[in-house]
Amino acid sequence: MKILLPVLMLLSGAAWANEGAPLAKQNWSFTGVRADWNKDELYRGYTVATQVCLACHSFKYISHRDLMRVGFTEAEVKTMAANLKMTIDQPIHTGLAETDAQELYGKVPPDLSLMTKAREGLADYVYGVLTGYSEKPEEIAKDFPTGLPKGAYYNHAFPGKAIAMPAPLSGPDMVSFHDNTAATVPQMAHDVVTFMQWTAEPERMERQRLGVFVLLYLIIFGVLTYFTKRAVWRDVH
Amino acid sequence: MGKHPADIRSVETNIVKNPAGWLNDRLPIISFLKDNALNFPTPKNLNWAYVFGGIAMVALMLQIITGIFLAMHYKADVKLAFDSIQHIMRNVEWGWLIRNMHMVGASFFFMAVYAHMGRGLYYGSYKSPREVLWGIGVIIFLIMMATAFLGYVLPWGQMSFWGATVITNLLSVIPFIGNSIVVWLWGGYSVGDPTLTRFYTFHFVLPFVILAIVVIHIWALHEHGNTNPTGKELRNKNDYVPFHPYYTAKDLVGIVAYLIPFSFMVFFLPEYLGHTDNLIPANPLVTPAHIVPEWYFLPFYAILRAIPIKELGVLAMFGSILIMFVLPWLDRSPIKSARNRPLFRQLFWIFVLNFIVLGWVGGKPPEGVYVLIARVAVVVYFGFFALLPLVSKLEIAKLKEGK
């Protein structure tokens, strides 16, 4: 039973497929054996997040001071915050008032701090949405023979394929990066999703690094307890 | 029981020379623990399936300890609850670890308890004279399910809110007073702030109730001792070993083996068993596409949804758990262990497999072929219990034939 239950969990986890197009798996710096935050990537992601996303969305669980945990210096962080007219301890809030957003888009844009954990498909899904816009009439006509709903935009990855958010990223060179990387749409999407993954779980690397030691400890301890058990039971068997 | 007061002559142990003896003469706690924990005679032929009781005990303690620390930082207020969880994850020292342990711990607690119940079912641990021990276990399982349900509401995400709405609404099927009961339970006309606060109160209290009932569970266990894989009551003292060091050593291996996958989930996939929708703050105006409970409720959720009449579905769901109380009287076979019961053994594995099918189908949308699968699985679930009296009879007849 103990062995079968995880199988059950696996099946139920994948119970409902996303109704959008299948998501392409991306290569993320925060997954895999050598996972780590990359300061340049985060900086570029931060640039997109604050110059594009922040117009409508907040990152309310994050302040500039948090960036010091991934290698930014206090001076850097202070300048970055000052550019947005913020203090380094202020939560990163959008300037768009909720009432205005309601009027403009028909809904309040969600906070993005937890976005990569709050949608099925996780980071790959958010990347899919950011790069999934299309204006090709034949494609739209295939899914919406009578035309898109009013105020909606066509997006492959979004469930139902009609999204209220206009395509946020357009390239090239919508923003300029600190390291002069070319700001193409896939590049911006990749970096901003990495940044969002960090805002969703800034403890991720710390957690995984500690996890390796905990597991090593438990495995060694487990072997020792097993042989202790054998020694204790020797006279019984 | 203790000695009659008239028989006690004098107690002359010296508090300085023998403080433990002095204490024990006044409160026999040391001899009590020695008799019930250290020296308790335990069958020496218990296999690894018997470690899950000890593991479940550790799981309960981990939930209580991590839960107390979470309670120090959590805010049971609809405006603050979701943010307070993020506060724990981000700002509280080791908050992410404590919270992940609590969250993953709930799932692993259920795994241990399901395995523990499966072992009890396989080796006939519910049979005379252990019916009460089994019944107390079912009570623990029920309270544990209630506690887990209440706890899942506290983060106040979309699944928290809508899960609470769906499940509490089930009580509206009670004739005449159902709707009033639901409103009374909510403390309002929908799941809201009063609901969250009272759910938090009960989520805090019930684990201690569970702990108390676990003590009674062990009390009942120690009246007749463990069953063992042979299913025979061992009447020879040589068949027993003291619990310590034999089973402390063995249970510890089991506990570490449990902690390894548990830690893997805590450190590498903490949110894997949860639902992404629960990272969206609760919104009474937006219903999620599919409302699903946590995986450990899925088999029972499947039973609920398989039946098209709501009232019957609710009855079947509660009945599927309550029927476990009468298991000792449905199964009339004097043979305890499934090892010596070929027919029951097959039935047992069908039941286990069917339970997994129920869990799987409970996570699927209630449409098309899934409805059919769920209905067949519900019939098999209750069919198991219905067939037990017959199976016992057939088996006894076959055994007599063999002789």
Image (spheres, rainbow, N blue to C red):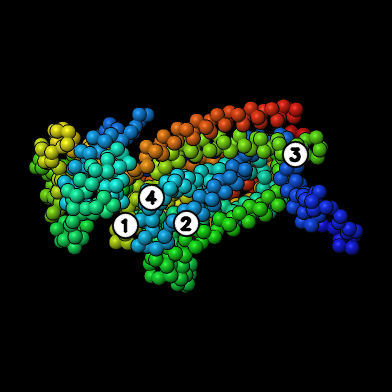
Labels 4, 3: one chain: yes
Q: Is residue A164 left or right of residue B230?
A: left
Badge 3 sits on which subunit?
A: B
Gap in angstroms between the C-alphas marked 3 and 2: 40 Å
Residue B81 vs B273, above or below: the answer is below
Residue A219 vs A143, above or below: the answer is above
What residue is disc 4 on? B91
**In-front residue for pair A85/A236:** A85
Q: Is residue B296 visible?
A: no
Labels 3, 2: one chain: yes
Secondary structure type for disc 2: loop
Q: Quadrant of the C terminus of chain B?
A: top right
Closer to the N terminus: mark 1 or mark 3? 3
The quarter holding residue B118 reads: top right
Closer to the N terminus: mark 3 or mark 2? 2
Q: Disc number at residue B335?
A: none
Q: Disc number at residue B72?
A: 2
Gap in angstroms between the C-alphas marked 2 and 4: 13 Å
Q: Disc number at residue B242?
A: 3
Closer to the N terminus: mark 2 or mark 1? 2
The quarter holding residue A175 reads: top left
What kind of residue is marked 1?
A: Thr
Closer to the N terminus: mark 2 or mark 4? 2
Q: Is residue A46 left or right of residue B40?
A: left
Residue sitting at x 46%, y 71%: B184
Q: Residues within 10 Å of mark 1 (few under 14, many from 20)?
A: few
For marks 4 and 3, give the one nearer the viewer: 4
**Picture mark count:** 4
